[in-house]
Amino acid sequence: MHPTLVRDLIDDLEGEINNGGFDQFFFNSAGDRTAQIVDALEAIGAVHTASIVRAAAAKFPGGMAPADRATRQGLLVESVSPESEAFEAEDAAFLEYRENLEDLVSRYAG
């Protein structure tokens, strides 16, 4: 995966999670690329963070957030997280930052 794409994907993930958690991430266009983001995290060696994103995405039917934004938004507000509380554990785990994503991206781009 190209280093610039990896940086963009991870920046999008962090921006959304830091601003409004996984509910915001999945509601906005960044969620269109959930599967790519998991791949990018794994590519840089952020396996713990990838597992958090994968666990959040697994709350959607089929085990992955749909790439289509309208479909994903409908599922999010109707069944996955109608009270915007479904991802509290994943939000907390992500915000622990057990892996230094910036450092891992820099080494990957190296």
Image (cartoon, rainbow, N blue to C red):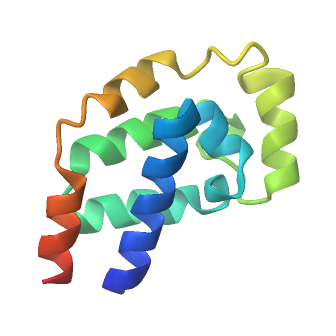
* Image-based side of 54 in relation to 33, left or right: left
* Image-based side of 49 in relation to 39, left or right: left
Identify which residue is drawn at 23% across, 68% down. 105
Identify which residue is drawn at 42% across, 56% down. 38
Query: Residue 98 lies in what quarter of the image?
Result: top left
- Please determine whether, in this image, residue 63 is positioned above or below residue 6: above
Identify which residue is drawn at 65% across, 38% down. 24
Q: Which is more toward the observer, 3 or 40?
A: 3
* Image-based side of 7 in relation to 15, left or right: left
* Residue furthest front in the image: 19
Q: Position of residue 5 (x, y in %)?
A: 43, 79
Query: Residue 83 lies in what quarter of the image?
Result: top right
* Image-based side of 110 in relation to 87, left or right: left
Q: Quadrant of the N terminus?
A: bottom left
Q: Quadrant of the C terminus?
A: bottom left
Count how many numbered circles sit on residues in the image: 0
- Please determine whether, in this image, residue 73 is positioned above or below residue 69: above
Q: Position of residue 54 (x, y in %)?
A: 45, 42
Q: Position of residue 94 (x, y in %)?
A: 35, 33
Q: Is residue 83 visible?
A: yes
- Please determine whether, in this image, residue 62 is positioned above or below residue 67: above
Identify which residue is drawn at 16% across, 62% down. 104
Q: Is residue 1 visible?
A: no
